[in-house]
Image (cartoon, helix red, strand yellow):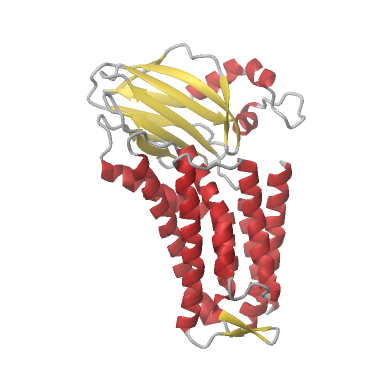
Amino acid sequence: MSRALQWLTVTLLLLAGSAFAHKPSDSYLTLRASPDGATIEVRWDIALRDLDYVLEIDRDGNGEITWGEVRRRGADIHQYALQRLALAAGGQACTWAEPAPLRLDRHSDGTYAVLGLQARCAPDAASLRLRYSALFDVDPTHRGLVQWLAPGSTGAQALVFSAESAEQPLALRGPSALETLRQYILEGIWHIWIGFDHILFLLSLLLPAVLLRAGGRWMPVARLPGALGAVVKVVTAFTLAHSITLSLAVLGFASLPSRFVESVIAASVVLAALNNLRGTVEKRRWVMAFVFGLIHGFGFASALADLGLPQGALALALVGFNVGVELGQLAIVAAFLPVAFWLRRTVFYRVGILQFGSILIAILASWWFLQRAFDL
């Protein structure tokens, strides 16, 4: 028993270490080619926190990066970026024109420097390739999220550059509807799998699904269909709720401040975990899933907006991303339920996982809440 609890503690602490950075390190690039491909306009948004990590922009070390500090290091920022972004047309390297002045822009997770670049390439080349290598040396999990508009195309192709895929070809024609749908399905799956707060909220609601509250104690359910019914209620309510607000936010009908959304999401994890200690909301956990699922939907919308929404294929991107989130969520449930049902009669599950694990989740999510609500 004590060994099992030790393993559970270590696992959650390891998870916590990754989860402190709710949003992974990403930069965002939009590349737009002229009709003959001779000129490629680039907008590149890089988080100031990432630039500070590699260039030490925060000169006075007070934890706040001012516009003056960014402007003073403008030449260094451009030099850093241009050394880590390369285009080649027909096997020949493209050259960079004088960059536009730096700007700043707000994203859902902070302030970004906006670089305006222009590449000059051989016209009507038979191939185009992009190499991206920013931050990989200091953060192997960093990604470059690219929206590529091919010559003469109005629909963007989404590409993800990572340390393992630092160089990729750029299609010379716009993506098909099927390709766009596939890209956003994969992004939806990826987002739910790295969204530790979404996962812990869902798991906190699902942990009691294989138990019943009787006489102030948790007792194992007798049959799998009983547990499955509870899981279906929670997952359906969560899916319905976040799909509603995700759609409303992406279509521009509703919006909430990012800090408020992220703080409430953290608070929802705390409440869901603490509920497992006394079973206050035992038979209506699906209501909790629906109510807080509405807020989680705004969080999903923020992630989708950061990816970039292709004009002319907005509905496809929205549907694809939502389907991806559901597929990723179902994969988590499929992995959870058989194991939980198998362990439900053990003290390890009822005390070690349900109660002790819920306490650890509540502590971790409380720290997220403080970070997000008070910008620590």
How far from the left and from the top, in percent, is residue 215? Answer: 69, 87
* Quadrant of res 327: bottom left
Is any atom of residue 10 visible in this view? no
Q: Residue at x 62, y 75 (%)?
A: 282
User: In the rendered image of this protein, does residue 1 appear above or below residue 315?
Assistant: below
Q: Quadrant of the C terminus?
A: top right
The image quadrant of residue 29 is top left
Q: Residue at the location (44% across, 26% down)?
A: 85
319 vs 38: above or below: below
Whether 348 is drawn above or below 35: the answer is below
Q: Residue at x 37, y 35 (%)?
A: 310
The front one of 290 and 32 is 290
Q: Name the quarter where the N terminus is drawn.
A: bottom right
- Residue 241: % across, % down: 50, 57
Return the residue found at the far front: 253
**Residue 10 placed where, x, y %?**
66, 64
